[in-house]
Image (cartoon, rainbow, N blue to C red):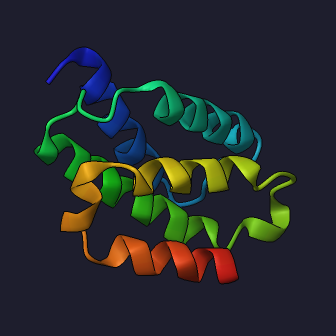
Amino acid sequence: MTVIQTEFIHLFQSLNSKKTLPLDTLPITLRNLSEYLQCVPLDSLGPGAWSSAIQGIETLFRRLTLLLPNLEDAENLLDIMVSVLKIPAVSKVSSIGCFSVTFILN
C-alpha cells in the first residue's frame, strides 16, 4: 500500500475511534473525502484496502445518522455514497448496499 492509501484508511480509523465526531471540522472532512473519492481511480487500491476503507466508511456513516440534523449540507454524504457504490469491491461487503438505502431514507 502507498502512503496515500494508508492515510486514507487511517482517516476512518481515527474518526471512528473518537467518542464524538468533531462537528466543527466534519463538513470540511466530508467535503475532502467526497472530492478524493470522485478523483481516485477505482483500481488504485487493492481489494483488501478497499474492504477496510468501505468498512470504515460504513462505520462512520452509521455514526453520522445521529448527527444529520446538525449537519448543514448532506450533499457530500450522497457524493460519498455514490462513489462507494461504484467501487468494485463493494459487492464483497454485503451490508453496504442495504445500509446506503437505509441511510438515505432516514
In the image, farthest residue toward the right: 72
Q: Position of residue 103 (x, y in %)?
A: 60, 76
At x 53%, y 64%, the residue is 61
Left or right of residue 45: residue 98? right
Q: Does 1 appear above or below 79?
A: above
Left or right: 65 in relation to 73 = left
In this view of the protein, which residue sits in the foreground, 83 or 48?
83
Give coordinates of residue 4: x percent, y percent.
Answer: 31, 20
Residue 31 locus on image (x, y percent): 67, 36
- Determine the residue positioned at 26% across, 51% down: 88
Q: Nearer the viewer, residue 12 or 98?
A: 98
The C terminus sits in image quarter: bottom right
Name the residue rendered at 32%, 35% in the picture. Answer: 42
Check the image and report above or below for 68 versus 80: below
| Residue 79 in view of the camera | yes
Placement of the N terminus among the 4 image quadrants: top left
- From the top left corner, tell me how far across and down residue 18 is, in percent: 48, 53
Q: Which residue is pictured at 22% across the width and 32% down the height?
A: 45
Q: Front-most of 75 and 64? A: 75
Quarter-of-image position of residue 17: bottom left
The vertical placement of 13 against 8, above or below, is below
Q: Quadrant of residue 20?
A: bottom right
Asked whether the viewer can see residue 52, the reply is no
Q: Is residue 48 left or right of residue 95?
A: left
Residue lying at the far top in this picture: please name it. 3
